[in-house]
Image: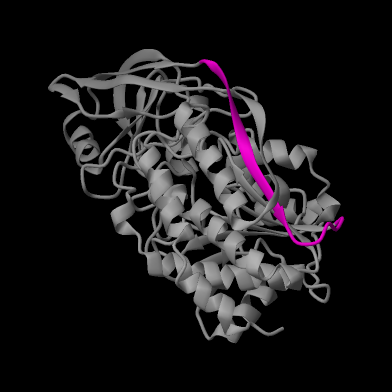
């Protein structure tokens, strides 16, 4: 397969993706089910139209909403700054503060949390074999009988973290949950451990709607390649990296593929999902209505551009890894290929059923989200160069995946389940209600 330089030059000098990124961050609050998310979906729909896509539309779905109010952590020495975690219930709880450290499963087994307030870090030690997600830590605390949950950032800068709780069956969590900065969390651990503290969250939980912005390019084939992102973001920041960058990137890919449409052997369908940040709702709706056997592959872009080198998690699909390596070699450009399973973001409602899918992100140092899910997820930390380079590589990858000679075999659900068990991830997914097997 040959990549002619014309489309590459046009993509590297294009403003379409970066201008869309600016549009998204300038919306302000893009929280799922709220007016800003709808504005972002409409802007993305319009960007797909301008790129030359067909059948462009927004497909709506019902959603359990959540609207932020005030939140407090009251200690004997006074009130400490915090923010509520989305889908926390509107409630107040008082109990002895217990520092549960990194919040590993063993930490919860060793701690006495009954009727107490759990203080838990956002990170895990480097020596630990897997990442422990926020929701897993929250539900370990719930299972241990905790009265409230305080999520303590490990990143410096006075940045309280956000991130949702709740499950698909019970979208609003069971105990009040807040995020505090590393600095506040350190002070709480030092000064308030063993003391009585009160955690209070005020919020609203209206019924609302969200949607997915959908568009197509290429031949009208039964098979398709999905190119996806999520358009929503947490309400406390611009959501530039997470995930304005991913949505801007797929808009740039749409523009590039429109120039190469005659080369596509398979339909490409773009989906900018709503309500990712509150439980992968939009992609779950899409997965439930889709014909999984017709999906050749998924390229899901979430939290890129901040790091210059693309990181493609392949979930054990050898064909996906091989395709990425071919593109990296062709362009003499680094792409990090990671074969492990990541049961988070919008590829997962498909990959869990054995559909081949990438999780595309930017490679960064250290564990966790960095500035993601904080006030500091802002446009100034991203570069147009990275967006354009990544769009070029991903466009070439999508063309590769649509090629009739490219084969990526699906995997049996039993293999996916076994890999999750072997990696120690099944335990967390079972406690959060995310285990589908």
386 sits to left or right of 283:
left
Q: Work out whether residue 68 or residue 44 is closer to the camera in this orientation and state it.
A: 44
* Quadrant (top left/top right/bottom left/bottom right) for the N terminus: bottom right
Looking at the image, which residue is at 82% across and 76% down? 405
Residue occupying the far left of the picture:
77
Residue 319 visible from this viewpoint = no
Residue 68, horizontal then vertical, whole percent: 38, 22
Quarter-of-image position of residue 223 = bottom right
Q: Work out whether residue 207 or residue 124 is closer to the camera in this orientation and state it.
A: 207
* Quadrant (top left/top right/bottom left/bottom right) for the C terminus: top right
Please determine whether, in this image, residue 268 is positioned above or below residue 435.
Answer: below
Residue 212 part of the magenta segment: yes
Looking at the image, which residue is at 20% across and 41% down? 183
Looking at the image, which residue is at 21% across and 33% down? 188
187 sits to left or right of 48:
left
Q: Work out whether residue 86 or residue 211 is closer to the camera in this orientation and state it.
A: 211
- Majority secondary structure of the magenta segment? strand
Please determine whether, in this image, residue 87 is positioned above or below residue 240.
Answer: above
How many labels sit on residues? 0
Residue 164, horizontal then vertical, whole percent: 47, 33
Residue 399 visible from this viewpoint = yes
207 sits to left or right of 26:
right
Residue 335 part of the magenta segment: no
Give the residues in magenta.
206-222
């Amino acid at each position: 397969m040959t990549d002619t330089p014309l489309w590459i030059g046009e993509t590297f000098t294009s403003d379409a993706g970066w201008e869309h990124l600016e549009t998204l961050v300038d919306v302000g609050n893009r929280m799922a089910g709220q007016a800003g998310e709808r504005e972002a979906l409409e802007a993305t729909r319009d960007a797909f139209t301008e790129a030359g896509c067909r059948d462009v539309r927004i497909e709506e779905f019902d959603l359990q909403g959540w609207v932020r109010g005030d939140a407090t952590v009251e200690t004997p020495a006074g009130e400490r700054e915090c923010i509520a975690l989305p889908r926390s219930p509107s409630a107040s709880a008082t109990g002895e503060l217990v520092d549960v450290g990194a919040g590993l499963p063993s930490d919860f087994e060793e701690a006495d949390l009954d009727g107490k307030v759990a203080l838990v870090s956002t990170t895990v030690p480097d020596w630990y074999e897997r990442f422990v997600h926020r929701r897993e830590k929250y539900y370990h605390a719930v299972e241990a009988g905790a009265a409230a949950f305080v999520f303590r950032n490990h990143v410096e800068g006075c940045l309280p973290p956000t991130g949702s709780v709740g499950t698909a069956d019970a979208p609003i969590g069971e105990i009040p949950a807040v995020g505090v900065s590393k600095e506040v969390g350190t002070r709480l651990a030092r000064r308030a451990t063993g003391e009585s503290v009160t955690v209070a969250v005020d919020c609203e939980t209206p019924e609302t709607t969200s949607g997915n912005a959908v568009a197509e390019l290429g031949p009208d084939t039964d098979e398709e390649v999905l190119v996806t992102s999520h358009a929503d973001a947490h309400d406390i920041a611009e959501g530039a990296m997470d995930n304005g960058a991913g949505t801007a990137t797929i808009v740039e890919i749409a523009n590039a593929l429109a120039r190469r449409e005659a080369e596509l052997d398979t339909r490409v369908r773009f989906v900018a999902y709503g309500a990712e940040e509150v439980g992968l709702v939009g992609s779950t709706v899409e997965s439930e209505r889709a014909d999984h056997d017709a999906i050749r592959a998924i390229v899901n872009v979430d939290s890129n551009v901040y790091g210059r080198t693309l990181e493609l998690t392949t979930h054990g699909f050898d064909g996906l890894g091989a395709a990425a390596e071919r593109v990296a070699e062709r362009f003499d450009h680094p792409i990090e290929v990671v074969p492990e399973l990541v049961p988070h973001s919008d590829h997962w409602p498909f990959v869990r059923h054995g559909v081949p899918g990438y999780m595309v992100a930017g490679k960064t140092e250290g564990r966790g989200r960095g500035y993601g899910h904080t006030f500091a997820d802002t446009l100034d930390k991203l570069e147009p160069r990275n967006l354009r380079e990544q769009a070029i590589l991903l466009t070439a990858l999508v063309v590769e995946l649509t090629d009739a000679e490219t084969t990526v075999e699906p995997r049996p659900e039993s293999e996916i389940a076994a890999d999750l068990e072997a990696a120690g991830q099944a335990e967390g997914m079972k406690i959060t209600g995310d285990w589908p097997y």
